[in-house]
Every structure is written in C-alpha cells, then in structure tokens.
Image (tube, coloured by chain):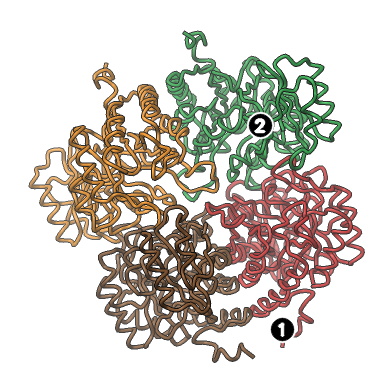
Chain colours: A brown, B red, C green, D orange
Amino acid sequence: MLIVMDAHATPEQVEAVCIEIRDMGFQAHPMPGPTRTAVCITGNEGPIAQTGRLAVLPGVSELIRVTKPYKLVGRDFRPFDTIVKVGRVEIGGPAIVVMAGPCTIESRSQLFESAAAVVAEGAQIIRGGAYKPRTSPYSFQGLGEEGLRYLQAVRHEFDTPVITEVMDTETVELVAEYADILQIGARNMQNFALLKKVGQTNKPVLLKRGFAATVKDLLLSAEYIMAEGNPHVILCERGIRTFDDHSRFTLDLSAIPVLKELSHLPIIIDPSHATGHYNRVIPMARAAIAAGADGLIVEVHPDPAVAVCDGHQSLLPERFADLMRQIERIAAAVDRPVLGRTPALEAFAE
Amino acid sequence: MLIVMDAHATPEQVEAVCIEIRDMGFQAHPMPGPTRTAVCITGNEGPIAQTGRLAVLPGVSELIRVTKPYKLVGRDFRPFDTIVKVGRVEIGGPAIVVMAGPCTIESRSQLFESAAAVVAEGAQIIRGGAYKPRTSPYSFQGLGEEGLRYLQAVRHEFDTPVITEVMDTETVELVAEYADILQIGARNMQNFALLKKVGQTNKPVLLKRGFAATVKDLLLSAEYIMAEGNPHVILCERGIRTFDDHSRFTLDLSAIPVLKELSHLPIIIDPSHATGHYNRVIPMARAAIAAGADGLIVEVHPDPAVAVCDGHQSLLPERFADLMRQIERIAAAVDRPVLGRTPALEAFAE
Amino acid sequence: MLIVMDAHATPEQVEAVCIEIRDMGFQAHPMPGPTRTAVCITGNEGPIAQTGRLAVLPGVSELIRVTKPYKLVGRDFRPFDTIVKVGRVEIGGPAIVVMAGPCTIESRSQLFESAAAVVAEGAQIIRGGAYKPRTSPYSFQGLGEEGLRYLQAVRHEFDTPVITEVMDTETVELVAEYADILQIGARNMQNFALLKKVGQTNKPVLLKRGFAATVKDLLLSAEYIMAEGNPHVILCERGIRTFDDHSRFTLDLSAIPVLKELSHLPIIIDPSHATGHYNRVIPMARAAIAAGADGLIVEVHPDPAVAVCDGHQSLLPERFADLMRQIERIAAAVDRPVLGRTPALEAFAE
Amino acid sequence: MLIVMDAHATPEQVEAVCIEIRDMGFQAHPMPGPTRTAVCITGNEGPIAQTGRLAVLPGVSELIRVTKPYKLVGRDFRPFDTIVKVGRVEIGGPAIVVMAGPCTIESRSQLFESAAAVVAEGAQIIRGGAYKPRTSPYSFQGLGEEGLRYLQAVRHEFDTPVITEVMDTETVELVAEYADILQIGARNMQNFALLKKVGQTNKPVLLKRGFAATVKDLLLSAEYIMAEGNPHVILCERGIRTFDDHSRFTLDLSAIPVLKELSHLPIIIDPSHATGHYNRVIPMARAAIAAGADGLIVEVHPDPAVAVCDGHQSLLPERFADLMRQIERIAAAVDRPVLGRTPALEAFAE
C-alpha cells in the first residue's frame, strides 16, 4: 500500500500518517519526491483492511494498492530514478560510473599500481577484494583486515571512494569502517541475515545477482536491505548459469531494460566475472552501456599472468584505457557522459 | 587438416592436391584467400595417416592439424571474415545490415505496408514468414505459397532482397525460387536433413541458434551446410532458454565475441524473438551492435495489436524508425556505418 | 471443446454431432470410452461461439470447455490411460515394457548378437538406429536402408517388433515399411513437418522430448501427431540440458508424475542417452520404474568398447541381464509385472 | 596428497606423519579405516614438493596424489561409506532413514501433532523450521528461539533426534544447543562463513545443494565443513533450476549415482521442496530410494491448507503413512530396510 500525499502536505501531516500506520502494527516509509511525498506501508501480510483510517487523514491524496511482491524497490512506489551518492560520485544519474581495480588485493603495491592506472583513466570507484568467497576451501581467501587497510590507504592517496565485498554478518561493521560501498557477492544474494545486517547500516550496498536468481529474486533481496531502512542499493548483473559453457557465465543484458521497468534502483554490470575472459570484457562493456546500464565494475590487474585469482578475466591497464575510450563513445551515442572522462555535462545539454 | 599453399601456387597445383585428397577417400575444399589458397580436408574420422603424400606435393607450404570438431566454419580454416552477398547487400562486411518486416505474412497489404515502412528507414532485406513453425498445431501456420508470392511482389516493388523461413526438405526448392535468403528456424537447427538440403543449394542461409544449442552445436550445424558445398552461411542468435522468465528467451550477446573468435561467419541478432516485448527490442538492438554484431533481424508490423502472431514483440513503424536512428549512432561509435542510413563508407575512412 | 455423449447415445447420434462440427468448419474426433463416447473439437482459434447448435443435438449430455493448449493428448479429453499396441505387446498397460538393442546398427552380426542377448532377458521390442542424427556432419550417419534390412531380418528371426528412428519426411514411408514403431529423436521434436507426416501414418510413434522442451512443448508436439489422425503416440523422456555437466543430460524423472496427470499417453524413459554412462543406467532405470514409467528404452552392445557411437553409455549383455532382474523387483514393488519376465499377470490380480 | 599407512602402523607412527605434515605448513587429517589408516594433507596450493620427507617415515605404505579439487569428501580419500550417527540412528548405512515434520514450526500443538504422526509411521528424525529463509522480507520468518524450544520439547517427548535449519553464523551456537542435526539451506550452500562455523562444531550437518550448484560445487562446500574438522556431513539434493516450470524445481536424481561414485558421504533426497506439490512427493520418494538414496526428508503437516508456508507441498499424515508403506517396498527391492519399519536387519542377512 502506497499513500500519496497532496503536493502541499505539511511534514506534520506526513508524520501523522506514519504514526497511524505504526499504530496499525505496520512499518511506514516516507519517500519525498520532487513534487510530493509518498508513504509506503510494509509488514502487512495480504491486503490492509482498515484503509479508511488512512484515507481520511489530512493531506492524503490517494491510496494505491501495490500487488507486486516487492514494494520499496519498485517503480510503482517510486517512479523516478534513485541516485546513490558515494562522496561526490552519483550512481544512477545521467552519467556512467566505472568502478575498477583488482579482483583480489594481493599486496599494497599491486593495489596501488592498479588504482593509479584506473584512476588515471577516469574510474570513479576503486574495487579490491579483501575477503574472497572461494568455491574451494583451499583457494586463497584474501588478505582480510590487512587488505582493508591497504584499501583505506589507496582511498586517501587517490581521494577516491572504494568498494569491497563483505561476506558475513560478523565483519559488516569492520568492513563498513573502511569501505564506501559494501558489496554483496552473488553467492550471498540470498544470505538474508547478511542482507538485514547491511540494511541496518547507512552505507551504499552493491548487490550482485545470484547466478540462478531470477530478476524477481534479485529485487526481493534488495527489498530486504531497503526494508531495514537503507535505501542506498545498487543492483549488479554479473552473469547467470545456463547450459552453455562458452563463457564462465552468461551475461544477461536483457535484465537491464527489465529492471529499469520494474525498479528505480541503479544497475551496474560486471563484464569481468560474467565472461571470464579478458578479450570479451570490452565488447560486453560496450553492450552494457548501450543497453542502458548506469555503470560498470571491471577487474584490472597490473600483471594478470601472476594474479592469485581470476587473472584470465583481468584487464591490463592499457586495455582498461581502451575500454574507457570505447565506452565513452557508446555512452555519447546514448546521450550520457562518463564520469571522469567527459568534460562537462553541459556539453550534452546543448 | 588444412593444407596451406604457397603464395605463388598455381591453380593446377591446388587441383593436384584436391585430387590426392579425394584419392585418399576424403573431401577437398579449396578456399582462396587474399594472398594464398588453403585446402581443407573433411570426411576423415580421426587424424589422417598418410600426410607425407600431401606434404611433398608441389606448391604445398604447410600442413595444419585442426583439432576442433568443426572445420569449414572455423577461424583456423579461414582467418578473414566471410562476407555473404545478397544482391548488392554485403552481410559480414564493415557495414551493419538490418532485415525487417512482419513476423508472419498475413495479407498482401500488411506485407506491403510493413515493407514500405522499413525500406523507407533503411532496411536492406525484407523479412516475412510464409511457413510458420508453431508450437501448437492449432495456431495459424502461415499463408504458404500465397505468402511466397506476396514476398516476390514486394521484392520487385521495393527492389530489395527478401528472407523467409523454410521448414522442411520438401519445400526447399519452392522457397528458394522466391527467397534471396533461406532462414532455418531455431527448432530446426538440428534438422540435419534440412541442413543438408539447403547446403545443396547456392542460396545464402540464415541459421538460427536453437534455444538449447551451445555455440559449438550452432557451428556444427553451420558445418553441415558448408560441408554440402554452400559457403553462404549467416549465423543468428535469437535467445536461449534459462531458468528465468523475465523475457521470452535470454538473449546471449556474449555469444557474439565468442563466435567472432571461433568462426569467420557473419552474425545477426534477433532482438524481437529473444525479448518477446517491443519495448526491450531497441535497447537490445543497441547492445547487439555495440557487442559487434553484423546486423539485426527485427519484426515490424503496421498494427501489432491485430497481428496473428507475436504482436507484442513487433515494433510499430515509428518505433522502427527510432531503432534505426539509435543503432546508427551506436554503429558510428564502433566505427561502422549502417547500410541504407550512413551516406558513404568514405565518411569513415577519413 | 469436448462433447460428452449420453451413455446410451447411438452411433448415428455421434455421427450427427461430428457432421455438425464439420459444418461449423472444425474437425471432429470421436473417442469411444468404456461407458460413453466423447467428441473432441479441434481447429478452432479461441472459444466456439455457436455451442447452442451442439447442445441441442440428440444424445449430447454435456459440453466441456477445454482451456489447455493441447486437447487430444490431455487427460481432460480422455481420463483413462491409452494403451499402444505393437503386435502382441501393450505399451501403457499394467505391464512394464523394455525396448533394447544397439544405439547404431553397425553390422548384421552386431545387431543379431545384441538382439539375441536382449530378447533372452525379456526385452519385448528391439531397438537399433539405421539413420543417426549426429551433431557433426563428419560422424558416422548410420547404415541407412541396409540397416533397415538387418532390422527386418532380426524382427523375423526373433519374432519381436522393432523400433528405429526416422529423421526426415522423405524417408517416413520407407522406414514405416520396416519398423513397428517410428522413433522421433529429441532434435526433431519440433520438426513439425515430420510430426505431421508420421501423424498421417497409422504406425505407433515414440516421441522423444527435446532437451530444452518443456513438458507442455512435448505434449503439443504429440498433439501435432494426434491431430493428423494417429492416436498411437508414446512419450519418451531422455534428459534435458541444465547448467551441470555431471551427466550427459539431466534425466527429469519428475516429468513422469506430471505427464501422468496431464496426459493419458504412455511414458518411456531412456536412461542411456540421459546419463551417458553405463554405470548410471541401472540406478536410473530402477528410479524410472519406481516413479511410474511404463517402460524403458536401453542401449545394449555386445562390445561397447568398439561401438561406433555412444559406447560409453551402452550396457554389456550381462549388465542388461542385471538391469532386468533389478527392475523386475522394483516393478513388483509398485504392483506391476515386467513383460517377458513376470510369469503371469494373474499373479498380481490375487 | 593421501598418505596410506601400513596395516600394522602404530598410532605413534601415524602421529609422527601428522607432525611432519604440520611442520611443512599444511594440515593433517588422519582417517582410520577398517584395516589401515590414511592421512590426508590439505592446505597446499599445487603439488607438494618434499614428498620424500614423508615417504621415508616408518609405517608409511604409499603416497597417493589426489587431483580432484576436493579431498576429504572424495572416494579417493575414503573408499568406504561414511555413516553419520545421530543418537542411535545411523545415516548412510544399509538402512534407509526418513526425516519428517512440518516445513515451519507454527505452534507447539502443530509441531507435536506432526511429530506424533510421523514417528508413529517410523520417521527417525523430526524436522521443523524455526528460522526460515524467505525470498520476501515480508513473509513469515519463523518463530526463532521459541520454535527451538518446541523442538526440544518434541525431541524429549518422542525420544527422537531433531533437525532444523541454521541461517547465520550468529545463531549457530544457539541452534546447536537444541538440534541434533544442523541443516544448511540451499540458499546458504556457498555462505562460506556459515560453512566454516558449522565445521567448527561437532554436530552432524545436512548440507542442501544450491539450486544452481553443480555436484562439484556441492562437494567443495562439504569440503569446507570437513576441512574445519567436522566429518559428520550429510549431502541433500532438493531440486535444481532449469528452463521448465512444471514443478517448483527439477529433482536431479541422477546426482545420486554420481555422488556415490565421487564421495563417501550419505545422500538424502528432499522430494517436497523439489516438486512443490504433494501428489508428486510419493513417486519421487520411491524413485529416490530406487536410485540409491540413503534417506528422505519430507514435509508433513496436520492441516496443509492452513500452513503458513509451502502447504501445497506438505503431506497429510495419512499420505505420509502411504509414503512409508511404499518406500518400504521399494527399499526391500534394493535389499535395504527402512529404519523404524522393517523389523530387523537380520531379515536381510538370510
């Protein structure tokens, strides 16, 4: 249920609606929009009976029944795009945002070398894994807190926000101290305890689609985070499992227009994990931007041949430079600038 | 096995190699290249024993063992791109080619109206189904030969080649009389009798990927056609089946760079069947071109609401015009013109 | 639409209903049942308008609207199980039927050796491929008509019906001369021209599920055959494609109870192609019978190591003997005899 | 690497091998067998260089290189079947074990009623969810610790072990206090933090296969648990995601013989979640036992129509009684008793 307020409703009237909802035993989520505020009700199983109590409150314009299983993440609830702000970077706005860096932080120098290379080409967010989910218990599991400290150092050195994965509830607080964006990996997309925990922080969360998760599952997992009070959710498509093994996963770019129809949240594409092969990363990066993605997350390594993990899908710095040049051209063809590359948004307003 | 000839080998020397191969009980396929000719051997099970007989022939430069299960369709066999010529249209060359028209030919006027609309916007090939493979025996199965006659009329009226599906061996000859390109549908991708039959014609064939066919299966089906002597094969990705049902099929755009690596054949994308919804066709068309496709095949209907088949995935003429404008911009961003749109190839050569 | 006649309706009344249906432009399919006859209407697109004309005819008891996309194959249409008779063998009745023999007929002696072995253990139908659909054009494609002649010889020698695959419309008549059951392979499940052609014969047809075909697709393909007038259809599950490659295909045994709910047609399971490995064939054969299958089709080869095709999934004769002993016990546990093994049906009637 | 000791090696010799392995920087896992002990080395990346140091130690018979990515769970490592003991119940031995009860604990009375019904029919383990992973945050999430207390009460009342799901690292200790078997749900199969945590307990763990996890992924997740020191792992197949939606998931029974080849761990099948429909549970339960499963986990509810969760896949008590009767017959056909049903194991030894 969505309660749309009058354009001139006062904050006190919005608050009165929220109090009434809480009295009914549900949660109230006020959502200010450009011209009016809406209040979303969650926590109800099935339709709400006493809608009359809400309809008569001062300032209430309309009651809209939401039939989709998700609410806060849905376009029905919020027709305009959500922009997630990370420092001065806006994700989900008109400009394309590129996040880049090594899959796994291997050493201070490896991280700094990668970061220098990607920042020089316009990457706005530095990525690097300190805790790594590995299919085998005998594979390298990441540097842990040491890796987080390197991330912090690189963050200060380049004055650029960082994103890193959080794998369990117990380290959420620790990772949140160091990272600007918390990444939830594909294997944890339905780790509901973890979703709730990051939902209780105020940090932006990049939520990767599980490799057998439907678009609906992904949105419901995002709803878990938002229902806890954290609206800063970024969706990420990184490939699904299919019968074919020509690539590591099958990148589902058609999910982009579908998610844009269903949800107001930003969408980032990970062409590195999806394809698993460096020479397919650039074509898929171009295609992602052409299909309407809001940005990319890309693996870059100064020496992929010696990478401890996923070297075959990492780009050399010079290839990353090429990727940036190419997607800048595609972005221009869909009337979008690339943050860090295109001089000024005004160029597009002419 | 591939026999690479000297740059100065004479036609007689090439022929002598072919004769020797046939004497050994195999087939020989000479393939002239820009600087030298290669001869491919097929028909052997396992490695060829008596390679010495070939290595010593005059004009033979090198013997290359091909370990992939397909040969004629492979990049190993032919490193440069195949261009399939259909009248004055070149598919697989630098320029993007768009094929468009109704899914099913319903009437003369419907076909002419669609054709006029798409040709006006630059479509180079007119599509229209006369024989329709339908999952249910009670669905409309197409106008048959009457539809073919309308196709022929539209072909003459607009001086534009036409493509239509051939569903069985018995109608191959009939369809080949009317059509410039024979389309093999996804459900027939492993109808080997049909593949052999179209392989015995000299008509270009557009081969659609089955919705559970691997990239390797697709290439082997193309090999069936080429092994019969018809080299004019165009590959088409039109979506695969996965666990998610957000779209009719899941368009596998990552197959584009993979196929470009493995094969020299042109690749066309069908965003209409893949997505099953008109408002996802344009984003996926843009993405396909950005990923490196050589063209598109798109459904356009003057009045999708009354279409007998697949109306929800057909574009109105004005939306098709929008698609053409948008892909022209994407194509320019990857340095390719769109045939029928971009004034001259020279513009790109500057 | 299904017209259920009175229990005492005369043949003339049934015929009058059929005539009325044909007058309306549709097809009529009378289906005699144990107590009353029903007449199924096909050929209509959408609901039938003039049902009043039918409801008032003498002998008509009830009009039932059928909303499923298939009709003739559905339980709604025919609530009791269909039994397909092949000589004295009944498929779909209380007894389990096993079809066995080599994947591919390689020689007269190989076929006779296999046949002798399987018949000795109780196989009721001899299988053997004369025309083989192969993913690669360079793989052995079968002995063709020579293979059919060996089949005929083995059929006479052992007085046992034979099943073999028909791959294209052009050889349907030829194959039908030699075979007791026509097999449609998985890759041809939606080769609609072929389905129609075998639907015009009066031969039993074993229709294999395509490896990406839904249960609904399978039933619609069976409907194609029945709609042409051939009611002797046997369904066959032989594995589907999934993301895992632990086996050649993933055998979908849960399709058995689903198909038994939706359709009255017999169901045969092919554990050989599904698993692709001989030591998984017996467990899956047991499971199939336990799940409610009406029979099995199994590959047996006197010397799998030298088989030209699929040797790794073929059973040695002694393993086949073991399979028969094991499924006989499972069949008894679900109160079913195995034809050729269990002495008398009366044993179960006590 | 596996170090096989002499049949007469002393405990001190085994310990000396373990010390040497730890000195080399790896972990040592001694595994006593019926005739001799083996010691498995884990923690090495790549082959071990200094094998000479181990080969010369007293009591060492043989060094075996293990090339599979998993070790402790593999048949190479332990050729005989693992039996997991839960009180007096043995899982993985000759007898079939059935676990049953409600999906979700809704109330004390509902749990007791279900438990009474299933224990009366021979169920050896009572199941019931206190913490429920739900795709939507607005669905009922379980009674939590209150549910655990009901479980404890039912455990005492019926003197029967209980199994319940643990969803996050933070509640592992709490759940372990109440439960005899810790269940890891499909969505958490690659929640590596959780796997490690349950690996540090000494409780039996039932690990459900993720719905897009390969058999190899499942075994590697089991390896995570065993690598932490907990050898009491039970594998559970509960259906995978495929393109077809005829059932909730596609039960992959062919994984049973594959897992039995690759691993020594017991395998339990969950036909309730896999099929999602009560009338398909019994056929799939029969098929699972016929295919070689060691047991079942089944949902039973006294009144499925009012179940808060998954009512359509729960069996009524009388249907469960029918299931037990039917699988007892199938089990006998594969020479296995059903614990709680078949009077004495001796019956089978005759």
Which label lies toward us, 1 or 2? 2
Mark 2 is on which residue type?
A: Val
Q: Of residues B114 and D80, which is closer to you in this image? A: B114
User: Residue D28: image x %, image y %?
Assistant: 18, 53
Q: Residue at x 44, y 68 (%)?
A: A312
Residue carrying label 1: B348
Label 1 SS? helix
Q: Are marks 1 and 2 in contact (CB under 8 Å)?
A: no
Instruction: Give the quadrant of the C terminus of chain B.
Output: bottom right
Residue carrying label 2: C73
Q: Is residue C68 above or below residue A299?
A: above
Q: Of residues A47 and B299, which is closer to you in this image? A: A47
Q: Is residue A125 left or right of residue C314?
A: left
Is residue C142 in view?
no
Q: Give the CA distance from mark 1 to mark 2.
A: 59 Å
* CA neighbours of label 2 inside 10 A, class few (<14), some (14 to 19), many (20+): many
Quadrant of residue B277 in the image? bottom right
Mark 2 belongs to chain: C
Q: Of residues B35 and D16, which is closer to you in this image? A: D16
Q: Residue at x 59, y 46 (%)?
A: C212
Q: Residue at x 16, y 41 (%)?
A: D6
* CA neighbours of label 1 inside 10 A, class few (<14), some (14 to 19), many (20+): few
